[in-house]
Image (cartoon, grey):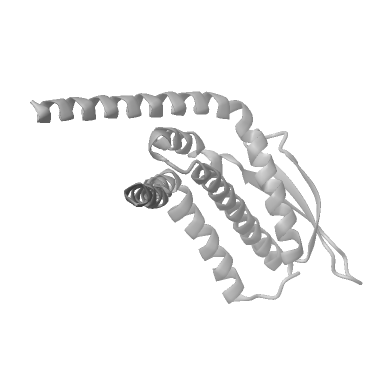
């Protein structure tokens, strides 16, 4: 009888978790269709400002592409003294790094009843944003390196090119695609954080009562 009740409670809990996940996923997906491009613009702008000094370039403009609504255009300019400087246009498809956000939000919502320290959600948000910034940073770095090599503004350097290719490829293939599952794993291992402190406090209270 007890086993049957436990199974029923477990089934009910799984159903509730599934409903929360589906509701959060659908709502965030609908919302993301409207706000996703603005989030992509902010991430691209931050990354473009960060990569400009690394590549010794001046960032002139970041704007939505008028021809392709999924692209955000970044305009850079070389700064070599006593030489003819050129402009560099790079397009970033924000859908490439935001497509998993609604699924990630659904997973986060499903874990809500199990997370004791709600600060974990701030950590998760910072982690997701950092991943996206790093991806666009290395994507822009790769594109700019290739463009500067083609124009002769950078000397051929196989090590640098491989570095940018590996970094961009790793973040795209291993991190972005598995982002929801990485976040889910982080939440899973964070669900008992703070429990040890509570147990210690209970033990201290018990000891005081015994005294």
Could you tell me residue 94's position as x and y percent? 60, 41
Left or right of 205? Residue 62 is: right
Residue 53: quadrant of the picture: bottom right
In the foreground, 68 or 189: 189
In the foreground, 31 or 164: 31
Residue 68 visible at all: no
Could you tell me residue 201's position as x and y percent? 41, 49
Left or right of 36? Residue 59 is: right
Could you tell me residue 60's position as x and y percent? 82, 51
In the foreground, 60 or 134: 134
Left or right of 182? Residue 40 is: right
The image shows a total of numbered marks equal to 0
Residue at the extreme left? 1
Q: Identify which residue is drawn at 15% across, 25% down.
A: 5
Residue 64: quadrant of the picture: top right
Where is 186 relative to 109, above or below?
A: below
Q: Identify which residue is drawn at 63% across, 30% down.
A: 35
Q: Identify which residue is drawn at 70% across, 75% down.
A: 155
Q: Identify which residue is drawn at 34% across, 29% down.
A: 17
Where is 84 relative to 29, above or below?
A: below
Residue at the extreme right? 82
Residue at the extreme front? 211
Residue 113 visible at all: yes
Where is the N terminus found, in terms of image quarters? top left
Could you tell me residue 101's position as x and y percent? 51, 38
Left or right of 163? Residue 207 is: left
């Amino acid at each position: 009888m007890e086993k049957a009740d436990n199974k029923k409670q477990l089934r009910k809990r799984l159903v509730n978790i599934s409903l929360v996940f589906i509701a959060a996923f659908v709502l965030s997906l609908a919302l993301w269709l409207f706000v996703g491009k603005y989030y992509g613009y902010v991430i691209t702008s931050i990354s473009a400002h960060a990569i400009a000094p690394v590549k010794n370039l001046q960032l002139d403009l970041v704007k939505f592409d008028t021809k392709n609504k999924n692209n955000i255009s970044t305009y850079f300019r070389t700064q070599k003294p006593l030489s003819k400087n050129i402009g560099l246009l790079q397009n970033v498809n924000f859908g490439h790094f935001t497509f998993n956000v609604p699924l990630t939000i659904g997973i986060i919502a499903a874990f809500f009843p199990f997370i004791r320290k709600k600060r974990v959600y701030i950590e998760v948000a910072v982690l997701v944003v950092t991943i996206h910034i790093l991806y666009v940073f290395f994507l822009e770095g790769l594109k700019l390196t290739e463009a500067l090599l083609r124009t002769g503004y950078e000397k051929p350097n196989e090590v640098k090119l491989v570095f940018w290719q590996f970094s961009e490829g790793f973040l795209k293939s291993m991190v972005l695609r598995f982002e929801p599952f990485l976040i889910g794993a982080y939440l899973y291992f964070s669900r008992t954080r703070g429990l040890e402190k509570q147990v210690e406090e209970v033990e201290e209270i018990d000891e005081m009562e015994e005294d």
